Image (cartoon, rainbow, N blue to C red):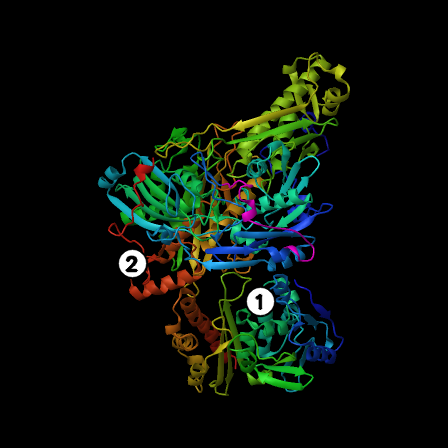
């Protein structure tokens, strides 16, 4: 570590003020799961740290009147894993509870994770597929942006230096009929080589009104497959040609001409395998409609 | 039951050898009170840090001047100032010392992580700050990652200005075996299998880091080095030689050592650097390496490319073995060449192959230094040879089990001498083989083959200690002292780092002396008070150190019994030891306490027999009756051989490429087992390192020679959650006839067969023969897809992949560089 000033503001307003006046060397410290490691290795050398993990405004999960879930970014993965949310929102607990290992889940927070924005660690892919929104605040005011706008395709996020992520919001439970998430890594506790999620909204007839796929691990931010998704609109979820769709998704998110080395070729194959698993789960979800 | 107990039987001393005495070591480990190298603190201690090269091959110019003025800094050092003051060191090759090691790179760095400069400061953080002030100019040179590129005629020279007796260019040593007549064997063969196999780099990855504290006493001129090492005396002698100090002025002490696996069995630059700083400053110097540094400089398993040709008769009989080995030992290597010599010789077992023609080239590359690692070359040759046995069996329409049974040496043939000269005193490997097959349900699973499932097996033998060709010794020693209160202290310079010395040596001493196990203590390994021994490596502790311990205990017992005979006015022949006493046979609740006998020797010497030297110490050294390597590669390097037969039942996922181990069987011949609990732990650990080599571990380099996975997050070491439950572990003892207690080495026999077992099982499951390690899910899945795309039978990975450029057949088969005969 190199020396830095440590600030522990009492309120969110104080935290925003600290960021507004802190200058470019000021960083937010959430759970510390990633940042502390980087500090120890001197890979990150902030002049000042603003610790936010105890700010009451950023803790816990609350249901909004329309059935959406507002997640406090300082909530740990371990806390999220113990939630029982309705319908597809329950996947939040499942994804959080199967992320890395227990000590990471006890320290790491969902907000810290998404701001670190490494799609290999599941949550960015899950939130992107669910069309979650991200609320950012600063002394200048608040703004709400979609997942695609939050995760920067060049890596990292689009948060401004003086902004704090104050909420992640899952859409209302009625907005999505089913969501499925799959991942694969060589070892149980490590980052995924590929993760993949699909979220479908069905009409009364069990036909696809909207479907959204996100693949993680293959680029610096989660990759959507809009063309593959658009082609499925109106099709009955129970009668999809899953093998064909999975291959099409893989070609869309990781074109064969770009899969030139072993790792990329493997990821392309894994996208097919995981997309098949996700589609099978979604098609079964249709049966219970 | 009315509580009546037979007094005689309850008092009869119980023998501890052969029982699972709980490990003496575990209390400190489990309660976190064990003191490892990083826990040591001394008054006035300073902290050193090393600046390491971020480049793999470059000319350098070093300017350390800005570091000296940084806050808290006491001293700064780089290589130039040590030239002529510090003696270079290296391996002894065929008795010739090679000076290719130095504390720092001078004008050129050879691999990423090589030492460039070092700083001492009041704190670690100040030392780190000062390192950042050191300016190094790098002028990059071409980088060679793999051994084949380093062999190219136009390859740049990595080690400049070093003359190797048996090598030139980037070849720093050669290996040659000529036994029988391979050409005739090939001409007479019904089948020749020719296959290139490559193996991976693997880290020791001991959780306890490499590190040391050096403390020089300016008044006495004595230097004490506390180091996380496997070998105190070899380290002491190396340090003293490099610093040109009298050896009685250098003392090496091992604290608790949290494993080594072979990666701590040599002297490292950081140990020399800490000593020099301490001698300059007269202060204790703490220098502990980071995990990333340990990956890069802590020595890795040598990767090998083996071009193997094996000849078979129709019935499966192996008649010949030919091999051209290219070994990547990294930019410099203390033990690398020995790995080829010893690993190949012993790895040929358990088949007494009559015709051998082996050439080896041990090559420098711009990668991490190669060294000793659990198995020492044996997993690499078994990986190739045991897969070829399966390939031949398939080609001949035979069961691989039957081919192994036909070729292996058997218990009934022992003792026997093999064509290469191994004297196998005893074995049960033939019985281990059949037991492994039965336990894995070999016949049933093969008869009822399920898609993507398969069984595989391999057998190997592991040396129990070894006479290294580079030096002519294989000894260990013990000093025992009966203390004046009847307790016993064991002094040994061989470091315990997971082998349970305090426990198993205590069991031996307890049985021979009749002293209570709880009264025995193992002193820390310290060259100041322990007898000279080589160290703890090569599966040698139980057999070699254990034999020295047994002899020392017997010598001490003679002295104790002599005193007791005098006091009791009895014939020594009539005396027994047990229950902390010496007593007349048959009267085991009487006699004299060891405490009394010991006190006579210290405080009541008139009680001693006339002329008895008043000491209750005994020393014994055991040097194994083993051979030096002959010019044709022949020789018996090992005192006895432990056998292992492993078998696996696997399932391969055709969606992810993941290999799931459904069942795994290990059957071992460890001779007479002193402590079954410890031996089982060794086999489990050995399996774990084998499975890491088979399924995941490797040093991954980018084109610039930067290792991209030098952290536990990225390095694919196996973790508990992904390992199968090992429930099928069996011992079929064939007691060693050479080692007096009958024991054999346990530490490495669990590793040797594992990669080949997995390779054979995956081949049975999928029809794909993997010839490259590790067999990672990405390789498996891409191979499955390519096999399906091409429809090719007997698909090999990577040989049948579109981008493979290596040799496939006799025409493209490479030949050793240079005329080997000239070098011998």
Give the number of marks: 2
Q: Quadrant of residue B487?
A: top right
Residue B286 counted in the magenta span: no
Q: Give the spatial CA distance, label 1 vs label 2.
A: 40 Å
Q: Residues within 10 Å of mark 1 (few under 14, many from 20)?
A: some
Task: Name the element at disc 1.
Answer: loop
Discs 1 and 2 carry the same chain letter: no
Counting from the top left corner in percent of width and height, residue B510 is at 65, 30
Which residues make up the magenta segment? B68-89
Which chain contains the residue that carries disc 2?
B
Q: In front: B714, or B8? A: B714
Residue B76 counted in the magenta span: yes
Q: Which residue is mark 2?
A: B793
Counting from the top left corner in percent of width and height, residue B201 is at 46, 52
Task: Name the element at disc 2.
Answer: loop
Q: Residue furthest left?
A: B187
Q: Which residue is mark 1?
A: A98
């Amino acid at each position: 570590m190199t020396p830095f000033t440590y600030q522990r503001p009492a309120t969110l307003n104080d935290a925003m003020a600290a960021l507004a006046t802190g200058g470019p060397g000021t960083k937010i410290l959430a759970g510390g799961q990633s940042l502390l490691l980087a500090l120890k290795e001197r890979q990150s050398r902030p002049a000042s740290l603003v610790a936010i993990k105890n700010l009451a405004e950023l803790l816990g999960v609350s249901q909004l009147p329309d059935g959406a879930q507002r997640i406090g970014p300082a909530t740990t993965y371990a806390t999220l894993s113990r939630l029982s949310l309705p319908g597809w929102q329950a996947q939040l607990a499942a994804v959080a509870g199967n992320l890395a290992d227990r000590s990471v889940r006890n320290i790491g927070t969902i907000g810290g994770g998404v701001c670190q924005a490494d799609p290999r660690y599941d949550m960015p892919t899950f939130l992107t597929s669910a069309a979650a929104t991200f609320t950012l605040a600063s002394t200048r005011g608040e703004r709400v942006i979609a997942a695609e706008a939050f995760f920067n395709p060049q890596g990292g996020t689009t948060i401004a230096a003086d902004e704090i992520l104050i909420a992640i919001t899952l859409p209302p439970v009625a907005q999505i009929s089913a969501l499925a998430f799959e991942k694969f890594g060589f070892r149980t506790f490590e980052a995924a080589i590929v993760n993949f999620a699909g979220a479908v909204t069905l009409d009364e007839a069990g036909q696809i009104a909207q479907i959204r796929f996100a693949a993680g691990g293959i680029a610096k931010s989660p990759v959507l497959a809009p063309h593959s998704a658009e082609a499925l609109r109106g099709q009955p979820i129970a009668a999809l040609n899953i093998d064909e769709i999975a291959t099409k998704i893989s070609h869309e998110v990781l074109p064969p001409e770009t899969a030139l080395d072993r790792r990329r070729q493997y990821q392309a194959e894994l996208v097919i395998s995981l997309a098949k698993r996700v589609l099978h789960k979604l098609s079964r979800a249709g049966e219970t409609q | 039951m009315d509580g009546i107990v037979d007094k005689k039987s309850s008092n009869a001393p119980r023998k501890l050898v052969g029982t699972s005495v709980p490990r003496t070591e575990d209390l400190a480990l489990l309660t976190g009170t064990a003191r490892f190298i990083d826990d040591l603190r001394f008054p006035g201690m300073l902290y050193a840090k090393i600046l390491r090269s971020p480049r793999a091959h470059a000319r350098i110019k070093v300017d350390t001047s800005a570091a000296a003025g940084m806050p808290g800094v006491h001293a700064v050092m780089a290589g130039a100032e040590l030239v002529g003051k510090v003696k270079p060191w290296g391996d002894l090759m065929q008795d010739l010392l090679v000076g290719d090691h130095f504390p720092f790179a001078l004008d050129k760095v050879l691999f990423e992580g090589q030492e460039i400069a070092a700083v001492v400061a009041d704190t670690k953080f100040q030392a780190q700050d000062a390192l950042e002030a050191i300016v190094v100019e790098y002028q990059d040179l071409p980088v060679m990652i793999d051994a084949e590129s380093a062999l190219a005629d136009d390859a740049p020279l990595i080690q400049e200005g070093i003359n190797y007796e048996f090598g030139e260019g980037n070849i720093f040593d050669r290996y040659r075996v000529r036994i029988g007549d391979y050409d005739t064997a090939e001409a007479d063969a019904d089948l020749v299998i020719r296959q290139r196999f490559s193996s991976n780099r693997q880290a020791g990855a001991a959780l306890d880091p490499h590190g040391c504290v050096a403390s020089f006493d300016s008044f006495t001129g004595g230097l004490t080095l506390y180091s996380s090492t496997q070998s105190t005396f070899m380290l002491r002698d190396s340090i003293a030689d490099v610093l040109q100090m009298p050896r009685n002025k250098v003392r090496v002490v091992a604290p608790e050592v949290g494993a080594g696996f072979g990666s701590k069995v040599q002297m490292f630059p950081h140990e020399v650097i800490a000593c020099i700083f301490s001698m300059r400053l007269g202060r204790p110097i703490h220098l502990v390496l980071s995990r990333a540094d340990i990956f890069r400089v802590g020595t890795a398993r040598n990767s090998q490319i083996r071009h193997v040709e094996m000849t078979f008769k129709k019935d499966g009989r192996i008649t010949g073995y030919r091999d051209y080995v290219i070994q990547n030992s990294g930019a410099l290597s203390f033990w690398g060449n020995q790995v080829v010599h010893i690993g190949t010789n012993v790895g040929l077992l358990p088949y007494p192959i009559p015709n051998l023609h082996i050439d080896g080239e041990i090559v420098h590359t711009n990668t991490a230094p190669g060294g000793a690692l659990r198995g020492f070359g044996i997993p690499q040759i078994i990986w190739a040879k045991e897969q070829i046995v399966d390939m031949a069996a398939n080609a001949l329409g035979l069961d691989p089990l039957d081919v192994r049974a036909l070729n292996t040496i058997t218990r009934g043939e022992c003792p026997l001498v093999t064509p290469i000269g191994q004297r196998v005193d005893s074995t049960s490997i033939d019985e281990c083989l059949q037991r492994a097959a039965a336990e894995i349900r070999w016949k049933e699973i093969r008869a009822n083959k399920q898609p993507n499932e398969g069984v595989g097996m391999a057998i190997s033998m592991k040396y129990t200690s070894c006479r290294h060709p580079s030096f002519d010794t294989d000894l260990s020693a013990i000093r025992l002292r009966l203390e004046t209160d009847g307790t016993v202290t064991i002094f040994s310079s061989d470091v315990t780092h997971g082998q349970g010395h305090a426990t198993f040596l205590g069991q031996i001493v307890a049985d021979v002396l009749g002293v209570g196990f709880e009264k025995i203590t193992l002193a820390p390994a310290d060259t100041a008070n322990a007898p000279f021994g080589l160290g703890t490596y090569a599966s040698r502790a139980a057999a070699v150190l254990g034999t020295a311990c047994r002899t020392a205990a017997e010598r001490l017992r003679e002295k104790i019994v002599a005193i007791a005979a005098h006091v009791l006015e009895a014939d020594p022949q009539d005396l027994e030891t047990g229950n902390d006493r010496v007593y007349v046979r048959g009267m085991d609740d009487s006699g004299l306490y060891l405490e009394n006998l010991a006190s006579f020797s210290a405080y009541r010497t008139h009680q001693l027999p006339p002329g008895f030297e008043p000491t209750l110490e005994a020393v014994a050294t055991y040097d194994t009756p083993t051979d030096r390597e002959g010019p044709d590669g022949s020789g018996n390097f090992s005192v006895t051989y432990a056998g292992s037969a492993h078998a696996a039942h696997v399932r391969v996922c055709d969606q992810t490429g993941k290999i799931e181990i459904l069942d795994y069987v290990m059957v071992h011949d460890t001779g007479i087992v002193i402590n079954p609990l410890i031996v089982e732990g060794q086999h489990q650990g050995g399996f774990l390192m084998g499975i890491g080599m088979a399924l995941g571990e490797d040093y991954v380099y980018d084109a610039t020679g930067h290792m991209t996975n030098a952290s536990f997050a990225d390095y694919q070491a196996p973790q508990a959650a992904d390992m199968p439950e090992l429930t099928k572990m069996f011992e079929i003892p064939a007691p060693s006839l050479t080692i007096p207690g009958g024991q054999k080495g346990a530490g490495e026999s669990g590793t040797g067969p594992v990669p080949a077992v997995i390779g054979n099982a995956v081949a049975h499951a999928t029809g794909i023969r993997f010839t490259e390690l590790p067999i990672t899910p990405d390789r498996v899945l891409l191979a499955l897809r390519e096999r399906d795309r091409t429809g090719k039978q007997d698909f090999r990975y990577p040989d049948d992949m579109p981008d493979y450029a290596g040799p496939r057949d006799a025409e493209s088969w490479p030949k050793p560089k240079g005329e080997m005969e000239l070098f011998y």
